[in-house]
Amino acid sequence: MSTTLDDETPSLRHDPYAPWRIGPYRLFASSFALAVIGSQIFATTVLWQVYELTKDPLKVGYIGLLNIIPVLCLGLFAGQLADRVSRKKILISTQFLISLCPATLAWLIHRHPHWPLALPVTYLIVLLNAIALSFGRPARASIMPTLVPKEIFGLAATWNASLFETASITGPAIGGLIIAGLGVPAALWISSGATALTVALTMFLPDLRLQRSPEPISLRSLSAGIRFVYRVKLLLAMMTLDLLAVLFGGATALLPFFAERLGTGSAGFGFLKAAPSIGAVTMAVYLAHAPPMKRAGRWLICALMGYGVATIVFGLSQSYALSLLMLAVTGAADNVSVVIRHTLVQTLTPDSMRGRVSSVNQIFIASSNELGTLESGAVAKLFGPVFAVVSGGVGAILTVIGVVLLWPDIKRLGKLSDVQESARDEEEIDPMETVVPASKLDVDGKAKLEIGRG
């Protein structure tokens, strides 16, 4: 009996630890985890610092606005850069700049503890940090698919999500504890140190030869990522669903107010901020070990509906334990969306376009997270934190219903591996001519790539 490729690969595809057997991936994952820890400590500390300075939810919400402005203004340029120059060099440069931001703020707070310009300077440093992140994220997202075989990329994406959430647990918890014990400057110095270590680790990553886009630099090539996402209807539906659900349902910007409402201090605030990541990492580990989802679309819809319900319960809760549990549920639900979307973005995108498509994905993600922060702060300013969170949860549920009505076949998405196989079958085709409408997903979830010019 002859042996086919399908006979030889199942054990590899079902080995949950396959990515960890690859040295470059282990190095990449370590630097990624440290980078997230550093960024989360910085975000937690800045959130607390602005809250302590102002006690104003709208001014806390401005942090989200400052984080989204660079993404919206520079995101497409960052993607273009990641498709034309060394992604490793971009990552090293941006990580170095990111490590300087918390160090600078820590030094200023230490030297000028009662400086009247403390708030605007904090905002300025947040903006500079966001600019560096806007260029670093597309480069990092584009590196990872080049380090592992395509057959196990889904597993690598799942483990990356697990690492992100684990680091997101560690970062806020460390930040909250350090703020309570040693103060804001100490938390900022540790954030800077963790990010600086990522620079050293990134230097040892292979600088793989980039498959540069054949298009000349122009407005058309700059907007190629947008056109690709628009044509690949499956990606457009996924990004829109995640964008709107998280934008309305996000409650993290108001956690300092809920920590006060529940009677906890800065340490309790740190654990509230870490709770979504506890749920997310639990879900990520489960997804890595469980058999592949047979109906990923239904998983996604149920998860985001649950996200909205848990947000509503959290907003109404007066119990610290129940609040922690509901935040953990939101994290677990969001992780399902992260794994599905990230896997599809990278497997359906050619390497020569990964930077630009990743930048579009970054715009969607940042818009949901950071505009959600601004939206929560503005609504809380007018109607109070409880109303802001509860109404946001209702908005998330209505968003899921609306997106499913607009793209009804999204619920028929099946195994992600089938979508990946279809993408690999078509990878020689000009990516700008590829269309994946939701209507072309059969009952088993197989994405049939339709070729056309409109």
Image: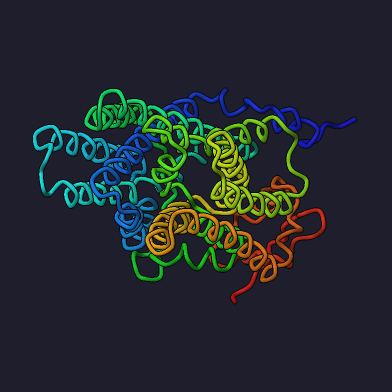
- With 197 as the anchor, is 117 left or right in this view? left
Q: In this orientation, which residue lies closer to the viewer: 113 or 230? A: 113
Task: In the rendered view, tell whether residue 348 sits above or below residue 88.
Answer: below
Whether residue 267 is visible here, answered yes or no, is yes
The N terminus, quarter of image: top right
Taking the view exactly as shown, the residue that stands out farthest to the right is: 1
Q: Residue at x 63, y 72 (%)?
A: 452
Q: In this orientation, which residue lies closer to the viewer: 132 or 166? A: 166
Taking the view exactly as shown, the residue that stands out farthest to the bottom is: 454
Whether residue 352 is visible here, answered yes or no, is no
Q: Residue at x 54, y 42 (%)?
A: 318
Question: Residue 385: x, y in percent?
Answer: 44, 54
Model colouring: rainbow
Q: In this orientation, which residue lies closer to the viewer: 199 or 68? A: 68
Number of callouts = 0
Question: Residue 248: x, y in percent?
Answer: 52, 59
Question: Residue 374: x, y in percent?
Answer: 38, 59
Question: Residue 166: x, y in percent?
Answer: 50, 30
Q: In this orientation, which residue lies closer to the viewer: 188 or 156? A: 188
Task: In the rendered view, tell whether residue 182 sits above or below residue 430.
Answer: above
The C terminus, quarter of image: bottom right
Q: Residue at x 55, y 38 (%)?
A: 319
Residue 208 occupies quadrant = top left
